[in-house]
Structure formats: structure tokens, C-alpha cells
């Protein structure tokens, strides 16, 4: 049977650059958890997790938050299976619970054009939470089409399509522990294959 390490090595060979190692990611996620714990002390934040990309990030983040937290999950689709934003946001799965009067913290994997987060913030603020903030592991400021606040940002990265630690290309690479830049020739080959 093929080992997990071998599979991850094969997946990692489709990257042309590792931007963030698992150690760098864990260090920063711990800092974000500590900051959130300080800022929300004496309250019970409601974390709205944006699936699928934020699943690994939130799993680590909540273990660094020293507070009771509640989790709700939303799934949105904005890219289809491509590396370019279509600008169209579709809610695939909505929250099961009312957020009226709650301290809501949106948990995102990456903010690129800002279109998805702008849409989500607008929609969620209409449900009248007490506060509404965002924590995003990654941000690509050079790609922004709309300015949108990110109260807690893990890393600002360049305008490159990245995978790993929850982020995918055509639903692959989410289980890589690091974050890296997808090799454009490998990406093109996979797109042509479908
Ligand atoms: P935005 O609407 O352009 O800000 O895109 C937000 C969503 O696009 C993110 O939640 C990701 O799911 C996806 N996305 C944007 N950039 C990347 C990337 O570099 N790798 C993987 N997914 C990305």
C-alpha cells in the first residue's frame, strides 16, 4: 500500500513553489487564535465557516481559541473548477441557525477579488448580528476588485494560484500540509484532461 507521505510527495511535486510551510502556518494560526481569544473574551463567538476551503484552517484555529465557540457552516461556489473568479457567488449550503444579536466571525480560506466576502458580509449583516468580522488565512491584495475589510488576516500573498491546507485545484491538493503555488503547466494539463 502506498504511504501517505508518498502521496503527499507526489501532490507536492505539482507545485512550483512552497509559499508557506506547515510550521509557518501553525505559528500564525496560533497567533490568530490568541488574538481572537483576547478580543472576544467574555463572549461566545459564532464562527461562520465557509466551506470547502476553510475546513482545515478552522479545525486548527478553534483549538487555539481559548473560549467557548459555536460553529456554523456555509458553502458557496464562486470559481467552478477553474483558477479564475467568475464573479458569480452561489450559496450552496446556508446556516441552520439564526445569527441575530450574535458576535459573528466569518472564517475564510482566502480573499482574492473580494467578491465572495463582500457578498457574504452583505448577506450576513442583513441578518443583524451584533458584530460581524472576518478571519481569513490568506489574502491576495493585488487581486482585489472590491475593497472589503479583513479584521484578522493570516498572510498576504502574491497574485498566484495556491493550493494546500484546505485549498484546492479541481478538488485536489486540499490535504497538503503546506501552501504552495500550483505549477501552471501541471494545472493546464489537468484542465485539458477533463
Ligand atoms: P474571491 O471571491 O475572488 O475573493 O474568491 C474567494 C474564493 O475563491 C476563496 O474562498 C477560494 O475558494 C477561491 N480562491 C481564490 N483564490 C484561490 C487560490 O489561489 N487557490 C484556491 N482557491 C482560491
Image (cartoon, helix red, strand yellow):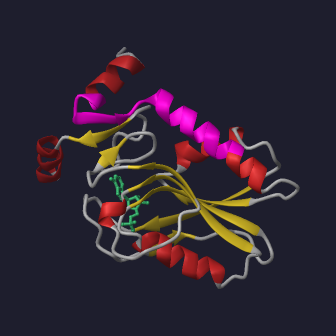
Is residue 32 located in the magenta-colored stretch of the structure?
yes
Tag count: 0
Figure check: 90 above or below 70: below
Q: In the figure, is residue 14 to the left or right of 96?
A: left
Q: Nearer the viewer, residue 80 or 65?
A: 65
Q: Nearer the viewer, residue 21 or 47?
A: 21
Q: Residue at x 39, y 40 (%)?
A: 164
Figure check: 158 above or below 129: above
Q: The magenta stretch spans which residues?
A: 11-34
- In the rendered image, residue 45, in percent from the top left (x then y), is placed at 76, 59
Q: Residue 98, can we see it?
A: no
Q: In the figure, is residue 5 to the left or right of 194?
A: right
Q: Main secondary structure of the magenta part?
A: helix
Identify the residue at the far bottom of this view. Answer: 126
Q: Nearer the viewer, residue 1 or 176?
A: 176
Q: Residue at x 32, y 38 (%)?
A: 180
Q: Residue at x 35, y 26 (%)?
A: 8
Q: Residue 150, can we see it?
A: yes
- In the rendered image, residue 44, in percent from the top left (x then y), is placed at 82, 57
Q: In the figure, is residue 58 to the left or right of 53?
A: right
- In the rendered image, residue 13, in percent from the top left (x then y), is placed at 23, 28
Is residue 175 located in the magenta-colored stretch of the structure?
no
Q: Residue at x 25, y 58 (%)?
A: 83
Q: The N terminus is located in which quarter?
A: top left
> In the image, ligand 1 is in what quadrant?
bottom left
Q: Quadrant of residue 182?
A: top left
- In the rendered image, residue 143, in percent from the top left (x then y), is placed at 30, 65
Amino acid at each position: 500500500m502506498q504511504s501517505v507521505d508518498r502521496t503527499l510527495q507526489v501532490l507536492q511535486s505539482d507545485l512550483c513553489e512552497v509559499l508557506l510551510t506547515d510550521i509557518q502556518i501553525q505559528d500564525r494560526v496560533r497567533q490568530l487564535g490568541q488574538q481572537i481569544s483576547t478580543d472576544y473574551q467574555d463572549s461566545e463567538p459564532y464562527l461562520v465557516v465557509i466551506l470547502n476551503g476553510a475546513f482545515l484552517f478552522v479545525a486548527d484555529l478553534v483549538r487555539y481559541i481559548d473560549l467557548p465557540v459555536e460553529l456554523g457552516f456555509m458553502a458557496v461556489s464562486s470559481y467552478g473548477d477553474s483558477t479564475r473568479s467568475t464573479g458569480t457567488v452561489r450559496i450552496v449550503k446556508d446556516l441552520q441557525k439564526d445569527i441575530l444579536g450574535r458576535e459573528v466571525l466569518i472564517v475564510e480560506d482566502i480573499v482574492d477579488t473580494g467578491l465572495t466576502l463582500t457578498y457574504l458580509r452583505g448577506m450576513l449583516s442583513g441578518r443583524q448580528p451584533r458584530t460581524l468580522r472576518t478571519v481569513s488565512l490568506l489574502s491576495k491584495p493585488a487581486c482585489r476588485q472590491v475593497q472589503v475589510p479583513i479584521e484578522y488576516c493570516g498572510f498576504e500573498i502574491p497574485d498566484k494560484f495556491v493550493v494546500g491546507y484546505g485549498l484546492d485545484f479541481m478538488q485536489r491538493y486540499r490535504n497538503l500540509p503546506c501552501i504552495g503555488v500550483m505549477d501552471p503547466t501541471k494545472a493546464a494539463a489537468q484542465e485539458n484532461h477533463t
